[in-house]
Image (cartoon, rainbow, N blue to C red):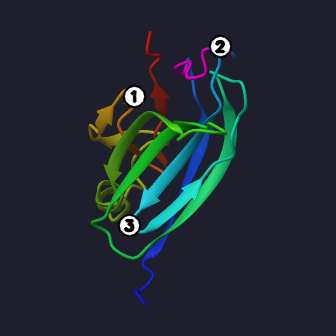
Amino acid sequence: MERLLGLLKVKVVSGVSLAICDPLAHSSDPYVVICLGQQKVKSGIKYKSTNPEWNEELTLSITNWTLPVKIEVFDHDTFTKDDSMGDADFSILDFVEIAKKDLSHVPHDTVMKTRRSTLTRATASPPRATSHGKTARSLRTLSSS
């Protein structure tokens, strides 16, 4: 069994103007999957929505700092394979590097560092480490018109 180094909590907030993957319903049934190594956690499905609001917190165990975190958005389909709507990935090490620094002298919510993510059919804001040890990241899937 691998040694637990910590927990990664990801708050899945919302999607904006997601692609319409179900043309008959003129909508989508999106959900989010977050992977870290062999672990996979999934948000709830938001039926018939291209602007879903999840407001869910998903937690993964960190056993290796070098594994990438992958975020994927899918459209749920009942009778066929779910459609990929977009993905993004980032490194936990970016956040660990900032967390090790003494930030007591830095004003609240100051952005300390940003990194660009690898993206497919989606855009994501770069991860931001802020002065009070919190990180912020948002994922927005583009509509495919």
The kind of residue on which mark 3 rests is Gly
Q: How many marks overall?
A: 3
Please give the residue where the numbered disc 2 appears in the rendered image: 26
Sequence-wise, which precedes: disc 2 or disc 3? 2
Q: The magenta stretch spans which residues?
A: 18-24
Q: Give the vertical position of 102 relative to 13 (above or below).
A: below
Q: Give the vertical position of 145 relative to 121 (above or below).
A: above
20 magenta-colored: yes
Please give the residue where the numbered disc 3 appears in the rendered image: 37
* Residue 59 occupies quadrant: bottom right
Distance Cα–Cα, label 1 vs label 3 = 22 Å
**x, y percentage for residue 140?**
48, 27
Question: Residue extending furthest front?
Answer: 79
Q: Residues within 10 Å of mark 2 (few under 14, many from 20)?
A: few
Tag nearer the camera, 2 or 3? 2
The kind of residue on which mark 1 rests is Ala
Q: Residue at x 70, y 34 (%)?
A: 46
Disc marking residue 58:
none
Please give the residue where the numbered disc 1 appears in the rendered image: 122
Magenta part, dominant SS: loop
Q: Residue at x 32, y 32 (%)?
A: 120
Q: Give the vertical position of 21 relative to 26 (above or below).
A: below
**x, y percentage for residue 30?**
61, 34
**x, y percentage for residue 128?**
39, 42
Distance Cα–Cα, label 2 vs label 3 = 35 Å
The kind of residue on which mark 2 rests is His
SS type, badge 3: loop
Sequence-wise, which precedes: disc 1 or disc 3? 3
72 magenta-colored: no
Q: Residues within 10 Å of mark 3 (few under 14, many from 20)?
A: some
Image quadrant in which the C terminus is located? top left
